[in-house]
Amino acid sequence: MNDFNRAYTPSTGAGSMDMAVNEGLRAFMLGVYQKLAYGIALAGGLAFLVGSNTFPPLTEFVLFSPFRLVVQFGPIALILISAFAMKRPSPLGTAVLYWTIVTLLGLSLSVWVLMATMNTEAASRAGIVYSTTFITIAKAFFLTATAFGALSLYGYTTKRDLQPIGVVAIFALWGIVGMSLLSFLFPPSGFFETAVTVGVLAISGVLVAFDTQNLKRSYFAFEGDERGLAVMTNWGALNFFILFYNIFVTIMSLLSRR
């Protein structure tokens, strides 16, 4: 009987199992990318709705009232709170977190659209002057999408373990976040601002590949667990969206300097 089972297994086989796993993994990753695409569409729509100044009271409320502090600091506050509050994350909870952060970051992007709409300039605390156009915004989006797609494809296909460099990149990113927060207490220099911009761009690129590889591993860890995979879909889309946002904003900053 044992011999019969051994003879029968290959014929149904390993190839069929591999194909099923590959189809499941592909469906999981497509779900993450689909949610990311919806998030990008929502963020872009909000940015243009507010930044186009079609409804001046809305633009005033989002960008020039105390609510702007919620837009500016809300995403990082939510990320920190969720890290401690979500001990057992649920699909609904992570979905609400995802769409809330997407909304706030989309509203923050309206600054660039407003600058392009009004043909105005803005200066950073370091004295760097920025101005932009809709063509620049389109270029930045194209460069971001191209870079993100290439880096994610690398993370998906590479056999190299990206864990070591990914961990270093995570610590480096939080270090930059900490230094950026300190810059609110001490006047930053132009060199510091440029270094932070380039650093965030490079680190975010590394993390795109790292997170893609991690998502593949997560699929195999939660395979068959629909609840776990739903949570990981939301976490994966959130991580991807934040990285996409970081890359886009840093490219916009570099292209819009005057």
Image (tube, rainbow, N blue to C red):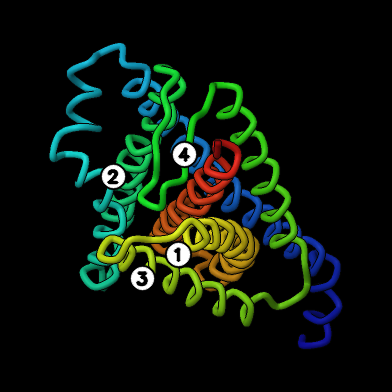
**Do residues under tags 2 and 1 come within 8 Å of each other at their CB atoms?**
no
Q: Nearer the viewer, residue 24 or 99?
A: 99
Cα distance, mark 1 to mark 3? 36 Å
Give the residue number, with chain letter if any, for mark 4: 129
Cα distance, mark 4 to mark 2? 30 Å
* Quarter of the image where the C terminus is located: top right
Dot in front, 2 or 1: 2
Cα distance, mark 1 to mark 4? 51 Å
Dot in front, 1 or 3: 3
The disc, 2 or 1, on the residue closer to the chain's N-terminal end is 2
The disc, 3 or 2, on the residue closer to the chain's N-terminal end is 2
Give the residue number, with chain letter if any, for mark 2: 100
Give the residue number, with chain letter if any, for mark 3: 178
Crowdedness near tag 3: few (<14), some (14–19) or many (≥20) residues, C-alpha within 10 Å = few
Residue that appears at 46% across and 39% down: 129
The amino acid pointed to by label 3 is Gly
The disc, 3 or 4, on the residue closer to the chain's N-terminal end is 4
Residue 225: mark in rendering: 1
Q: Nearer the viewer, residue 1 or 79?
A: 79
The amino acid pointed to by label 2 is Thr
* Direction from residue 111 to residue 165 in the image, left or right: right
Dot in front, 1 or 4: 4
Q: Position of residue 137 (x, y in %)?
A: 55, 29
The amino acid pointed to by label 4 is Val
The disc, 1 or 3, on the residue closer to the chain's N-terminal end is 3
